[in-house]
Image (spheres, rainbow, N blue to C red):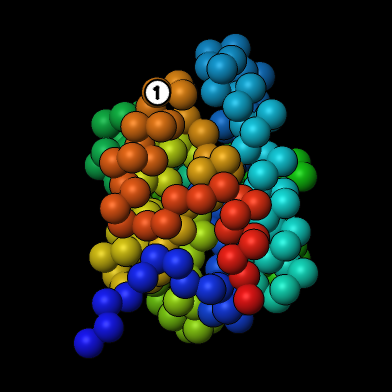
Amino acid sequence: MEHPKRDRVLDPKRTAVLVVDAQMTEFDDAKRAEKPYYVGQIESRALPAIQRLIAHARSVGSEVVYTVIESLTKDGRDRSLDHKLSGIHVPKGDPGAKMIPGIEPGEDDIVLPKTSSGVFNSTNCTYVLRNLGVENVIVVGFLTDQCVDMAVRDGADLGFYMICASDGCATYTEERHEGALKAFGGYCRVQTVDEVIASFA
């Protein structure tokens, strides 16, 4: 039997871009004051890359799916234990759950609120992607070494062909960013956004 390779040509109709937690809680004035390097990387590197990837995906008819940290309730009683212990809470309908300007969902895009690091663990993402006929998942977003990492590993275990567009991701330090890419690189194809775009059929 032929061994599958990671150099698959991407069929647009079988491919989705998964935008992870690219929301205003990661980009507001408070975060800018607390983590200036991180917000600077979002602004200078990740956002332009995500914009290019989304624009290409839309132009060829691929799905763009968003996940966002947002409770299903105002008081966050539905949050995971880890989010409760960590003090992570974005109330239902809070402005912090809105996407960063320039990469907002279209009117018919799917947005999956979650209250854990792993989108495949705490949403119906798997079910939705299967219903859409998606086999290939391109991940971008924040943080590279937390929620992006979880999406890549879990998606791979669930049988999706995972790709991480590295310049469309960011975390608090460059060391953490590069370390995460090396750590989960065995579960996915790691490429720049432009390299990913070039791999579409």
Camera-side residue: 124 or 166? 166
Q: Position of residue 77 (x, y in %)?
A: 36, 45
Could you tell me if residue 117 is visible in this image? Answer: no
Q: Position of residue 72 (x, y in %)?
A: 47, 53
78 relative to 141 in the view: left or right: left
Q: Residue placed at 67% from the left, 44% from the top?
A: 49
Toward the left, the furthest residue is 1
Q: Position of residue 177 (x, y in %)?
A: 43, 31
In this figure, which residue is indicated by the disc labeled 1?
Answer: 175
Q: Secondary structure at mark 1?
A: helix
Whether residue 197 is visible to the viewer of this picture, yes or no, is yes
**Label 1 amino acid?**
Glu
- Residue 81 x/y as whole percent: 25, 42
- Residue under the point 41% across and 32% down: 178
137 in relation to 177, above or below: below
Q: Give the number of callouts.
A: 1
Residue 101: quadrant of the picture: top right
